[in-house]
Image (cartoon, rainbow, N blue to C red):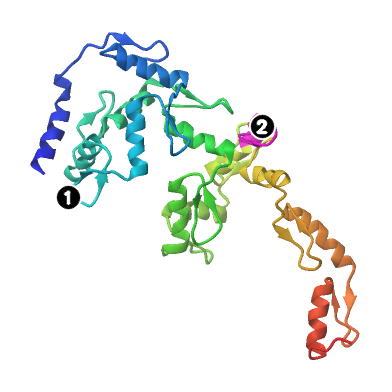
Amino acid sequence: MNKYIGRVDHMKNSDMHQIEKPFKCNFCEKSYSCSAHLLRHVKTHSGEKSHKCTLCEKAFYNSWDLTRHMKIHTGERKFRCELCEKSFLRSTSLTEHMAVHTKEKPYSCELCTKAFSRTSHLNAHLKIHSGIKTFKCDHCVKAFFNSWELSRHVKIHTGEKKHICTFCTKAFTRLSSLKEHLKIHTTVKTFKCVYCVKSFTRPSRLASHLRMHAGIKPYACIHCNKAFLNSWDLTRHTRIHTDEKLFKCQHCQKAFLRSSSLKEHIRIHTAEKPYKCECCGKCFTRSRGLREHSRVHAEEKAGCQHCGKTFSCSNHLSQHLCVQTNGQIF
């Protein structure tokens, strides 16, 4: 383990090795010590990914990024941690991982008190201070400090939800959201409401719920008189005023305020009809369509000739007659 502590100590003192970086990027504030590194970086702005993987659809800016990626397919992870079972594709990843065991955070921010175990985390943090958001969304006006934040945001527009709950049918765009959702199925809800039978996994959720009983709505809309219990309800409401429709259909040009509205709309293209009438078997794309249809059956009630009981559904009447006649329908 001492050799890894030595590596971390070396990283901590890396400020001693100040290298001149005369090659500056024209698109952002980054600079490099050699022209080859600058050329590699410029490709990230142009979007040119000429090195393609033969096993999947991914492409990369450089050949070494492709070589590193290929190890994911081959399963090659030769850099193993001596303190736990984890193994890594790169030696640098193992070195950074060792900071988890040593609790070292050698990369400090000069503008605030925060420190980080990885240079990538420090660089991402520094962009917050600069206020420069170079990664812009093609679907809306939003911009982000990092590429992974942009990738995560784009899923809102595409509707991609690959993180699926194994206990129910819910799906999520983020793994963290799935993990939070799983607590509903697996975690004891220790935070109980004193006014009703509801309980929660987190104190913040209980605090939000208690506002409902107290009638407190601290999140007020600046455009109208409406107020809300939670910040996310306010955010969703504000889109009505700004006409910000983040959820866009990939099949046509329509956009929606809510992901649920987009989900319903996509069924028009896929012909999916998940809402089935119990009376006649007719299916609908929306729950509203099923509710409206159910009124037809409610107005056409059929009566039992044996007891006079009425039913809004012929299937329910048939089941009832079987009981009344011991399975013999005359």
Where residue 320 sits: x, y (%)? 80, 82
- For label 2, the SS is helix
Quick check: is 309 in the magenta stretch? no
249 left or right of 235 in image: right
Q: Mark 1 vs mark 2: give the one in front.
A: 1
Residue 169 in view? yes
Q: Which residues are magenta?
A: 238-252
The residue labelled by disc 1 is 83
Quadrant for residue 112, please give it: top left
Say which residue label 2 marks: 241
Residue lying at 70% horizontally and 52% vertically, measured from the top left:
272
Does the image show residue 192? no
103 is higher (above) or lower (below) than 242: below
- Judge whether 38 appears above or below 86 on screen: above
Quarter of the picture holding the N terminus: top left
Question: Between residues 71 and 141, which one lies in front from this camera angle?
Answer: 71
**Quarter holding residue 147:** top left
Expressed as whole percent of the image width and height from the top left, the position of residue 16 reads 14, 20
